[in-house]
Amino acid sequence: MSKLAEFRQLEKHLAEQLQALEALKGDAGLKQEIEFETKLRALLAKYGYSLKDIVNLLDPQAGRRAPAAEAKTGTRKPRQVKVYKNPESGEVVETKGGNHKTLKEWKAKYGSEKVESWLAK
């Protein structure tokens, strides 16, 4: 895209955004929300409270709750170690996943089904 075309495209987007901004400025709901926030912040400043203080006052249990995202961390069960023994060479491979170099080489050479049959129990 040429610089001129990019400039005109950005100019068009800017004009659209300015038009949307002007429409929002005339919105009665937005004016009401701005007025409420202004009065609330003034009231908090007057009494020396912060938003955290108000949340703790209205919902004391909110600070003690663990976020849902943190609760799920570490719940995955650890993988078990699998031991493969090559009957031809006697070589042993221990791995927790299928991304082991030697195991991949064996599967390429002998086939996946045959290598899986070498799994020690």
Image (cartoon, helix red, strand yellow):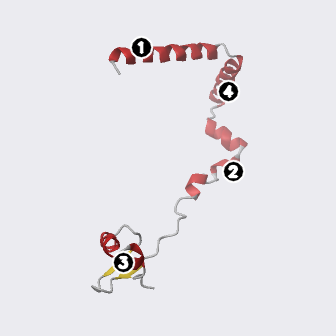
Q: Residue 21, position in %: x, y?
A: 58, 16
Disc sitting over residue 40 in the figure: 4
Name which residue type carries label 3: Glu
Sooner in the amino-acid sequence: mark 3 or mark 4: 4
Residue matched to label 3 = 94
* Sooner in the amino-acid sequence: mark 1 or mark 2: 1
From the viewer's perspective, is residue 41 above or below residue 102?
A: above
Mark 3: few/some/many CA within 10 Å (<14, 14-19, 20+):
some
The answer to which image quadrant residue 105 occupies is: bottom left
Alpha-carbon span between mark 1 and mark 3:
61 Å
Q: Residue 93 or 88: which is nearer the viewer?
A: 88
- Disc 2 from disc 3: Cα separation: 48 Å
Mark 1, residues whose alpha carbon is within 10 Å: few (<14), some, or many (≥20)? Answer: few
Say which residue label 1 marks: 8
Three-letter amino acid code of the residue under disc 4:
Leu
The reply to whether the C-beta atoms of the residues labelled 4 and 2 are less than 8 Å apart is: no
Q: Quadrant of the N terminus?
A: top left
Towards the viewer: 66 or 110: 110
